[in-house]
Image (tube, rainbow, N blue to C red):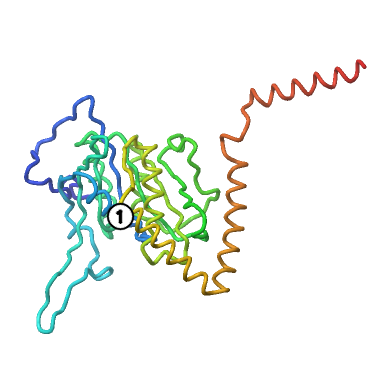
Amino acid sequence: MLDPAALFRPAPHLDEEYHAPRPDESPTLVVTLGSYGDAGSTQELIDEHLLERFANHKLGDFDVDQLFDYTGRRPPIVFDHDHYRQYRAPQINLHQVTDASGSDFLLLTGPEPSLQWERMAAAVETVIDRFGVDRTVILQSFPAPTPHTRPIHVSGFASDPVLLGELAGIPASFEMGASFLGLLTVRLGEHGKDVIGLVAHVPHYVADSAYPEAAIALLNQLQPVSGLTLPSDGRLDTAAIATREQIESQVARSEEAQHIVAQLEDQYERFMSERALTSPAKIPTADQIGAEVEEYLKGLDDSTDQ
């Protein structure tokens, strides 16, 4: 494998030499690299919100020429009558962002790497070590059979399931095509790094359009697992309201759409009911079960004596 550390190019204002972080520094790394498809443009909306709403600066980038398949995902360019202009080259950037309470964290943005996955995963680990990252949180989304009329469900995954706490995963086991973020989670976990993934379930019929409610749901879930203060106020909330009104208007004009949404609502309610029954918070402990059995047996003794 080529040197992973060479993939990361620090910004000019950073020293090239590694400097151990102070004992009180343990920033979170938030990762929004694309994976499969960015359902509801969720990662894009989060990047825009964080980089426009909060103070930030660029710490460096990764050599995208080593990682990106240009013919597989052609970057945009404008042809204007007789010349080309505005070529938008892909970028994988590392930012330092300051949240609303003054705490710094790192944000890794850009497209999913197409090439050299193992090298890139190792390169991300060198960045984690260099900046003393305490925890990595991956934010992503996928199209799901869920209605827009219900709260966005966010499921979780982790390098160690203990990290999820009360956040539930998906109640199924299956083989699928790998993503870079999946590989990254595996490799970091193998090396003892804490990784938590948050996945927004975006209504499949709006997955190709911007869906701000999914971005807001991920930001809300990000705060308790990272300790960061990242309110989604302002333009993102306004956009979510406008998007909801637009969808409601479209559904109201189609009986077929109303029927589909109603079916999805029923399915959603059943799913959430089953989740509530199997939630760790709803399952009694061994001591609680033992106490209840003991009380039941006492009741049997009392009825026998009568």
Count all numbered tags in the image, as a single digit.
Answer: 1
Q: Residue at x 26, y 48 (%)?
A: 50
Q: Residue at x 57, y 61 (%)?
A: 264
Q: Residues within 10 Å of mark 1 (few under 14, many from 20)?
A: few
Extreme residue in the bottom direction: 81
Nearer to us in this view, 231 or 116: 231
Q: Residue at x 12, y 84 (%)?
A: 81
Q: Percent from the top left, x then y, of residue 24?
A: 23, 25
Q: Percent from the top left, x then y, of residue 271?
A: 59, 51
Give above or below for 84 relative to 299. Answer: below
76 left or right, relative to 257: left
* Residue type at tag 1: Arg
Q: Quadrant of the C terminus?
A: top right
51 left or right, relative to 291: left
Extreme residue in the right direction: 306
Give above or below for 71 relative to 223. Answer: below
Q: Percent from the top left, x then y, of residue 39?
A: 39, 60
128 left or right, relative to 294: left
Nearer to us in this view, 255 or 39: 255
Q: Secondary structure at mark 1?
A: helix
Q: Percent from the top left, x then y, of residue 198?
A: 40, 47
Residue carrying label 1: 235
Q: Residue at x 29, y 34 (%)?
A: 134
Instruction: Name which quarter of the figure residue 242 lies in.
Output: bottom left
